[in-house]
Image: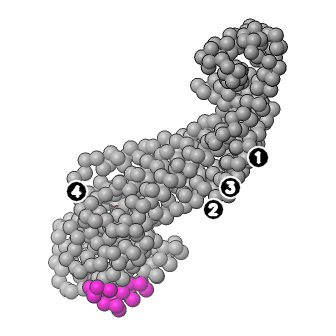
Amino acid sequence: MTDSTTPDNNTHNQFDNKAKAWSARFSEPVSELVKRYTASVDFDKRLAPFDIQGSLAHAEMLAHVGVISKDDLAQIEQGMATILQEIEAGDFDWSLDLEDVHLNIEKRLVELIGDAGKRLHTGRSRNDQVATDMRLWLRAEIDRLLELLKQLRQALARVALAQHATIMPGFTHLQVAQPVTFGHHLLAYAEMFQRDAERLADCRRRVNRSPLGAAALAGTSYPIDRERSAERLGFEAVCRNSLDAVSDRDFAIEFCAAASLVMTHISRFSEELILWMSPRFGFIRLADRFCTGSSIMPQKKNPDVPELARGKTGRVNGHLIALLTLMKSQPLAYNKDNQEDKEGLFDTADTLRDTLTIFVDMVDGITVNADNMRDAALQGFSTATDLADYLVKKGLPFRDAHEAVALAVRKCEELSCDLAELDLAQLKAFDNRIEEDVFEVLTLEGSVAARNHLGGTAPERVKAEAERILAEK
Ligand code: ARG
């Protein structure tokens, strides 16, 4: 064994001493606690496939420009193939002594192929390496999330199509406002998830840039070809400043911000599902596989999944704040603080992926109690605006019509009846322009059918909109 402080033969390398001290320059190792405190391997090992992909692109570029030999490259490729297999089979021996995913893989490569493995890290640093890994990983995550958002929109559109003419009360201030169709209400969420997808796709463009070649911070003195490795990794461009390349985590923050909005929409939807499922509303039922009972109250069926989704929104929002706070005081360029970007980011992507996957299935399993929805829409004078609009069409200025209908509603409250239950003579007392044709206007069906314009709640429009979404590629 070579003494860590006295490198005395030419086979000596950094990894030989890693368990004792960082390198020959150090006189003592870190304590066990410091080792655990500074290590990231427990959580960054999930980056392994991307780390290997990045290393292969770097090695290929080094061979192309003549910094390493073709033979070195061939050995590196072979060694990495073995390592990938070992990792996938669960046979890879991850070591805390080797701190992170990068050093674990590199050490194993040197074990497998010797000197060629030691040449891989030429012209690179873990700083540009980890930034590359994170971008490759996040790009793949975004692609999965985009697919899930599309599936969720399609599920909403399927239910909306089936329920395009089902009438429910629309609310403002959680007070009955005007009748809407249930399909229309669901398609409001399809709009939100469409904007979420657009935001993620836009964020992906800035994720998809290569930091590789920035090395530790200042670039490297080797004649590297950054565009070559970038292209091989499918990056759209290279980061154009080496200091920025290793220190930038905007891409992760942008992703977390977009993710927070996805969860905000999921949370609003969850809140409504929970309300609608309450016996006080009784509008919908969720399939039993998304609910649980109570250990004490036998009658209970609780909407656990939407409740948890609403709760998990808090942690995703928390990760966004943590990342912003992580970055706010960091001087250029790389700082170890950046290692703290990972767990929150990973958890954000995992939470979103699980949540969206479950919601696709849950939306498809919504069953509707149309009678309860209709009954609720009949309460609260939801067609009062229709009566005002009717009077306007007969020549009354809108503000006067508003006043006339307010008086009519007041009368109904006294009599405990709905507007449609007043007879023509009673209605005429509020404005004598009112004729027999008013009763069509006062029905729920008449009210929603009248809103037949782009973005309106008319069943015909909802059907067309749902079909448009279902036809999307
Ligand atoms: N584990 C580190 C991280 O996650 C990798 C980069 C370490 N670089 C360094 N100079 N210590 O950020």
Give the residue type that dot 2 points to: Lys
SS at circle 4: loop
Question: Distance from label 1 to label 4 (Cα)?
Answer: 56 Å
Q: Is mark 3 within 8 Å of ligand 1?
A: no
Span highlighted in magenta in the image: 63-78
Give the residue type that dot 1 points to: Ala
The 10 Å Cα crowd at callout 2, few under 14, some 14 to 19, many 20 or more, is few
Is residue 188 shown to the viewer in this render?
yes
Residue at numbered disc 3? 470
Q: Earlier in the sequence, mark 3 or mark 4?
A: 4
Q: Nearer the viewer, residue 409 or 306?
A: 409
Question: Distance from label 3 to label 1 (Cα)?
Answer: 12 Å
Quarter of the rendering containing residue 450: top right
Q: Nearer the viewer, residue 156 or 321?
A: 156
Q: Nearer the viewer, residue 41 or 180?
A: 180
Question: Distance from label 2 to label 4 (Cα)?
Answer: 44 Å
1 or 4: mark nearer the eye: 1
Q: Earlier in the sequence, mark 3 or mark 1?
A: 1
Where 77 sits versus 48, above or below? below
Q: Which mark is residue 473?
A: 2
The residue lying at 39 percent from left, 51 percent from top is 253
Question: Decide: marks 2, 4 in contact (CB < 8 A)?
Answer: no
Quarter of the rendering containing residue 122: bottom left
Question: Decide: marks 1, 4 in contact (CB < 8 A)?
Answer: no
Q: Which mark is residue 162?
A: 1
SS at circle 3: helix
Quadrant holding the N terminus: bottom left
Question: Decide: marks 2, 3 in contact (CB < 8 A)?
Answer: no
Q: Which mark is residue 332?
A: 4
SS at circle 2: loop
* Residue placed furthest toward the bottom: 71
Q: Earlier in the sequence, mark 2 or mark 4?
A: 4
